[in-house]
Amino acid sequence: MESDLTVKLPEATALPDERLPYTVSEILNAPIPHLEKLDRNIVRLVMLSFRKYLLGFSGLENLQQTDPFILVANHNQRLEALMLPAWLAYIRKGKPIHFMADWNFRLIPVVSMILRRGMTIPVVTKSARPKFLNVLKPRLTGTVHGFDLAKQRLAEGTSIGIFPEGTINPDPKCLLRGHLGAAKLSLETGAPIIPLGIRFPHHDRSKPIPVFGQMEIEIGAPIFPPQSENKEVFRDSDVRTLHSIMMQHLAELSHKHWNPLTSRRTYNDNTQKT
């Protein structure tokens, strides 16, 4: 059955680029008043460590949308899991966006500390490697399911961040089909979706995106879900429609292609054989 869902689409605007990298002085002296001292130092350390990998950004005014919102981004390489939350905290002066992240990262001591300080929301669908480490999952993730915790944070007025592809996808041309969680959260809470595209302007698109690649960021205008007094009446087709709109905008911002028939979970390297 086709959905009759009506979604408020963002208007296309021409946005000036901000060219980077930041200077060391800028990072050390930038005010980040909404964070505690330790967290400010963590953000600055990440920014200093990876500042040369962020070439520029545009659309920053779209983040002026009143919290809460659901920020969605394409996921090309591991660096983004640290760099993107730190950069967003930096430009928002420490105002939090709590990202959903694979619980396996909490098995890495230093990374685990950063994720905990950032109040990331653990996603527990994947098994640990090696599997015997799964015994630590309850201790590291808590008892509340990731989707329910994200919904709770939105209800409290805190924005969240999601990589809807659900895994690292280094394909330079195509997005994965993606998971429906962001669209479902938006419909159930009324929070708008803000798409954020990450692209690699100097990368050879005939090869997979590397672990460390210089990126630029473009933030799209908010996508507002329809208003409803009863947020439990949305059909599966409504969720898929909003997800499709979201992924199409994400594809435009990241300069990739999106096809709803592609794989949802697995990156297939079509650029070279391994």
Image (spheres, rainbow, N blue to C red):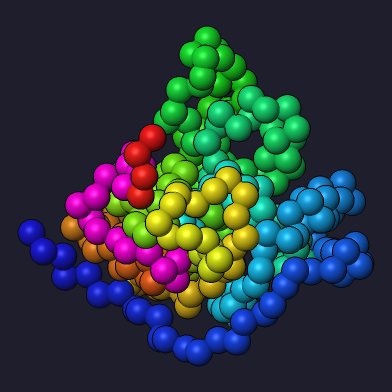
- Give the residues in magenta: 253-270
Q: How many labels does the image show?
A: 0
Q: In which quarter of the image is residue 240?
A: bottom left
Quarter containing the C terminus? top left
Asked if residue 265 is among those painted magenta in the image, a careful observer would answer yes
The answer to whether 94 is drawn above or below residue 273 in the figure is below
Residue 231, position as x, y percentages in the image: 33, 59
User: What is the magenta segment's predominant secondary structure?
Assistant: loop
Quarter containing the N terminus? bottom left
Give the camera-side residue of 24 and 4.
24
Classify residue 39 as left or right of residue 155. Answer: right
Q: Image point 55% across, 21% down: which residue?
A: 137
The answer to whether 9 is drawn above or below residue 128 in the figure is below
Classify residue 155 as left or right of residue 233. Answer: right
Residue 181, position as x, y percentages in the image: 38, 49
Q: Image point 40% across, 56% down: which residue?
A: 206
Q: Quadrant of residue 254?
A: bottom left
Q: In which quarter of the image is residue 24?
A: bottom right
Res. 57 in view: yes
Asked if residue 196 is among those painted magenta in the image, a careful observer would answer no
Classify residue 98 as left or right of residue 41. Answer: left
Identity of the residue furthest to the top in this view: 132
Give the camera-side residue of 13 and 187.
13
Q: Image point 56% across, 14% down: which residue?
A: 133
Give the camera-side residue of 9 and 259.
259
Residue 58, position as x, y percentages in the image: 59, 78
Q: Image point 52% across, 14% down: which residue?
A: 130
Classify residue 244 as left or right of residue 223. Answer: left
